[in-house]
Amino acid sequence: MSTSGGNSRLDDSVLEFIGKRVCARPVYGWGWSKSGDGTNFVNSVPVEIPTVFHFLIASFFDWIEEPEHIYDGYWLLFYTRHVGCFDFSSRIADYNFHIGQNQPSLFSPSKNPQMAKAWPLPNFPNCSSVWGYGRIGMTNDVITNFEEERLKKWQLERDASKK
């Protein structure tokens, strides 16, 4: 489940989540943006960070299932931001999120075959798209516990470095 030659991947255990809902928590990261064309990220504008939402994994091209959420019914394409092997229960990753109304495809090989092979980028044809940063876990509690543990670890490391 990793990109060819990549050092970042999802553990095969995430395959058991196909057909099931998982939770996504958007965070600020580098901010959230929107473009009028799902393939052009140059003319983008900032947007508000979406609230927590749930989505159904349907072959890892996924749509959001959160009634009354601003992006309910939209497709979510995500990929890890860091090296490692991640899952949705104990090894929570930071992800780039791309959200669009039409079903996504990956970066067109006709535009740049080497880029498409090494780093498949999102393409939401004929619609606007929104992108930003966040985390995914089985539940919001799983994400919260991960963030709390990571904060404790950083605080311990900071305190140890002051001694």
Image: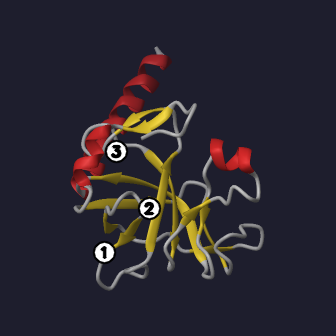
**Measured along the vertical axis of the image, is residue 142 above or below residue 155?**
below
Amino acid type assigned to the residue bearing label 3 in the image: Glu
Picture coordinates of residue 42 (x, y %)? 77, 67
Question: What residue sits right under mark 2 in the picture?
Answer: 26
Residue at 68% x, 70% y: name it: 39
Dots 3, 1 in contact, CB < 8 A: no
Residue at 60% x, 51% y: name it: 120
Number of residues whose C-alpha sits closer than 10 Å to that of mark 3, classed few (under 14), some (14–19) or many (20 or more): some
Disc marking residue 9: none
Picture coordinates of residue 51 (x, y %)? 39, 71
Amino acid type assigned to the residue bearing label 2 in the image: Pro
Q: Which of marks 2 and 3 is in front?
A: 2
Dots 1, 2 in contact, CB < 8 A: no
Question: What residue sits right under mark 3 in the picture?
Answer: 147
Distance Cα–Cα, label 2 vs label 3: 13 Å
**Which element carries disc 2, helix, strand or loop?**
strand
Give the mark, 1 or 2, whose residue is nearer the N terminus: 2
Residue at 42% x, 62% y: name it: 61
